[in-house]
Image (cartoon, helix red, strand yellow):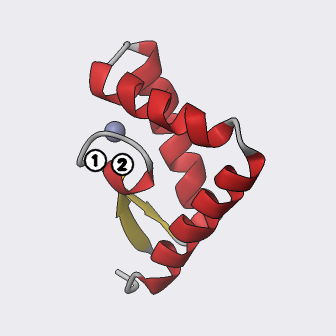
Amino acid sequence: MKTMKCKDLGGACEREFNAPTFEEMAEISRNHGMEMLKIQDRPHLEAMNRMREIMEDPQKMQEWINSKRMEFDKLPED
Ligand SMILES: [Zn+2]
């Protein structure tokens, strides 16, 4: 398992996620983001607005995913 923080994944808090693969890590992070959106958590809403700019550009989005995947790959196993 590897550990990444919400903040490391384009989020806004220190919540830690544990997952064995980057895909699962991204999924957990996305679910957490949806929960925060539901309760209208302001720091997460702002983080999501910043992410939206990246998400609107498929090339930027791909670059962002690649850089996060590289960070994930470099992390030590827990
Ligand atoms: Zn968070």
User: Is residue 34 depicted above or below 1 in this figure?
Assistant: above
Image quadrant where residue 2 sits: bottom left
Q: Name the residue under label 2.
A: 6
Within 10 Å of the Cα at label 2, are there few (<14), some (14-19), or many (20+) other Cα atoms? many
User: Is residue 74 depicted above or below 10 in this figure?
Assistant: below
Say which residue appears at 64% left-offset and 62% top-offset. Answer: 63
User: Is residue 2 depicted above or below 11 in this figure?
Assistant: below
Which of 63/40 is in front?
63
The residue carrying mark 1 has its beta carbon less than 8 Å from ligand 1: yes
Q: Mark 1 points at which residue?
A: 15
Q: Do the residues labelled 2 and 1 touch (CB within 8 Å)?
A: yes
Which badge, 2 or 1, comes first in the chain's sequence? 2
Indicate the amino acid at tag 1.
Arg
Residue 69 is situated, as x and y percent measured from the top left of the image, at: 57, 70
Residue 77 is situated, as x and y percent measured from the top left of the image, at: 40, 84
Say what secondary structure mark 1 lies in: loop
